[in-house]
Image: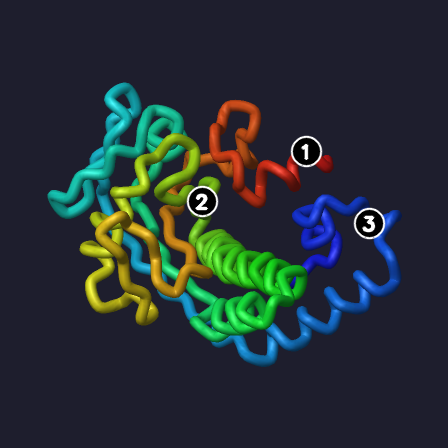
Amino acid sequence: MISRENILMNLGVPSDQAEPYLIGLIDELTARSLSVCSPMATCSVFFSPTIDPVAGVMAINEKTFGLNRMVAKAMHKSTSIALFIGTCGPDVEALSKSFMKKGEGLEGFIVDIIGSEIAEGVADFIHKRMEKLLAKENLKVTNRYSPGYCKWPVNDQQVLFELMGPHNCGITLTPSSLMIPVKSVSGIIGVGTDVVNAGYACAICDAEYCLYRDKKRQL
């Protein structure tokens, strides 16, 4: 579900001060973006990870992630780890660029924000779907974490994609670990009987451009 309020927030416009023109434009561009997007997602569960919350590292199938202590602490009671990859596809990004090339910067920026919302919605769907399915087995899930956020080095994206193999939704990585299409998401979710979904620790996270940071500020 695309939130008009989140889009306005990212534009720096309070929802109660938005002009009717802007609201109409957001709704129009949301409908157009949804008509061209092609969301996809995949998830794989890996059992018996080795997690050291003091060193801030996690090993899965002899591949090591340098999670840092914050993420490792959130994961350390997990008996299995779910890796996920998702995307809204390339066409929303292409739509945004087409507006930019025509000099319609506002439209291009709004579509870019919508693309991020769609990609995050894909990750949210995976997370909630897993939580629902695993609850039937008396298992719980942690927060989801992505490379590049919460002080987890973004280059661990390479390790995550290696473990996922061909199950990557057609997403590729640049040498600097940027996902292509850009409006894509990846990350991990801990699974176990004693894990906790504690919400997002925005106060101690240094990710300036995280969607969660701004949403938490609204609460």
Q: Position of residue 119 (x, y in %)?
A: 50, 60
96 or 52: nearer the eye? 96
Which of the numbered marks, if any, corresponds to residue 55? none
The disc labelled 2 sits on which kind of residue? Arg
Please, which residue is most extreme toward the left here?
Answer: 62
The disc labelled 3 sits on which kind of residue? Ser
Quarter of the image where the N terminus is located:
bottom right
Question: In this view of the protein, can residue 166 be seen by the observer?
Answer: yes
Q: Which residue does the image show at 51% across and 38% down from the upper left?
A: 197
Contact between marks 3 and 1 (CB within 8 A): the answer is no
Q: Position of residue 213 (x, y in %)?
A: 59, 37
The residue that label 1 is drawn on is 217
Disc 1 crowd rating (10 Å Cα; few below 14, some 14-19, many 20+) is: few
Task: Name which of mark 3 and mark 1 comes first in the sequence.
Answer: 3
Q: Position of residue 68 (x, y in %)?
A: 32, 28
The disc labelled 1 sits on which kind of residue? Arg
111 or 43: nearer the eye? 111
Please, which residue is most extreme toward the bottom here?
Answer: 35
Q: Which residue does the image show at 19% across and 44% down from the upper left?
A: 60
Disc 2 crowd rating (10 Å Cα; few below 14, some 14-19, many 20+) is: many
Task: Name which of mark 2 and mark 3 comes first in the sequence.
Answer: 3
Question: In this view of the protein, can residue 136 be seen by the observer?
Answer: no
* Real-space Cα separation, disc 3 to disc 1, in angstroms: 15 Å
The residue that label 3 is drawn on is 15
The residue that label 2 is drawn on is 144
210 or 121: nearer the eye? 210
* Real-space Cα separation, disc 2 to disc 1, in angstroms: 19 Å
Q: Quadrant of residue 144?
A: top left
The number of callouts visible is 3
Residue 76 to residue 4: above or below? above
Mark 2 against mark 1, which lies toward the viewer? 1
